[in-house]
Each structure stands twice: as C-alpha cells, then as structure tokens.
Image (cartoon, rainbow, N blue to C red):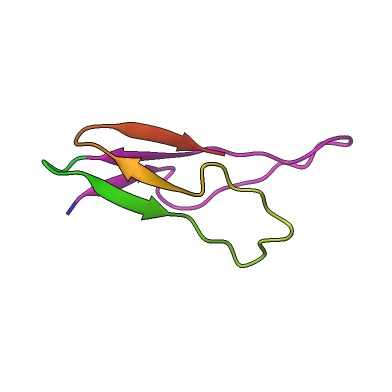
Amino acid sequence: MALLYEPNSHLTFNVPAKGNAEDTLKLTNKNSFGVLFKIKTTAPKQFCVRPNAGYLDPNESVEVK
C-alpha cells in the first residue's frame, strides 16, 4: 500500500505576528484502489485540520491544511 505524503519528514509552523500559523500536507494515493485517511493531532483544541478525514481514489491527491 502506498499513501505518499509531502513533506515526508515533518511540518514546520511559522507563527506570524498577527493571525494563525498554517502549513500544508499533501496526500497522494499511489494504489490501484481507493483508500480512506484520517488525520489526528495530539492537541485537537489547538489545531484545526481540514479535511481531517476523507477518501482518495487511485492516483488522487488532496491538500490538508
């Protein structure tokens, strides 16, 4: 099973003086079948993850913020 994610090591949040910190995670399904995904965080009240779950068709990608 191959669900690729970029960046593949870690996310880096740069906090601006005003506003919210944001980074993007790109998920790509390299399988010949669809996959479900769910993103969990250790601090759900501090981080808003959208979309936090979904379905990816074969060779489909989604950007999670």
Q: Is residue 3 left or right of residue 21?
A: left
Q: Main secondary structure of the magenta part?
A: loop
Q: Is residue 43 left or right of residue 59?
A: right
Is the residue 61 above or below the residue 15 in the image? above
Estimate the x, y position of residue 28 in percent, counting from the top left: 31, 38
Which quarter shows the N terminus?
bottom left
Which stretch appears magenta?
2-29
Question: In the image, is residue 16 part of the stretch drawn in magenta?
Answer: yes
Estimate the x, y position of residue 57 in percent, counting from the top left: 24, 36
Q: Residue at x 74, y 57 (%)?
A: 46
Image quadrant of residue 45?
bottom right
Image quadrant of residue 13?
top right
Farthest residue to the right: give it.
18
Question: In the image, is residue 5 part of the stretch drawn in magenta?
Answer: yes
Number of on-image labels: 0
Which residue is nearer to you in this view: 56 or 6?
Answer: 56
Which quarter shows the C terminus?
top right
Q: Is residue 32 left or right of residue 29?
A: left
Q: Is residue 49 left or right of residue 16?
A: left
Is the residue 34 above or below the residue 39 in the image? above
Farthest residue to the left: give it.
32
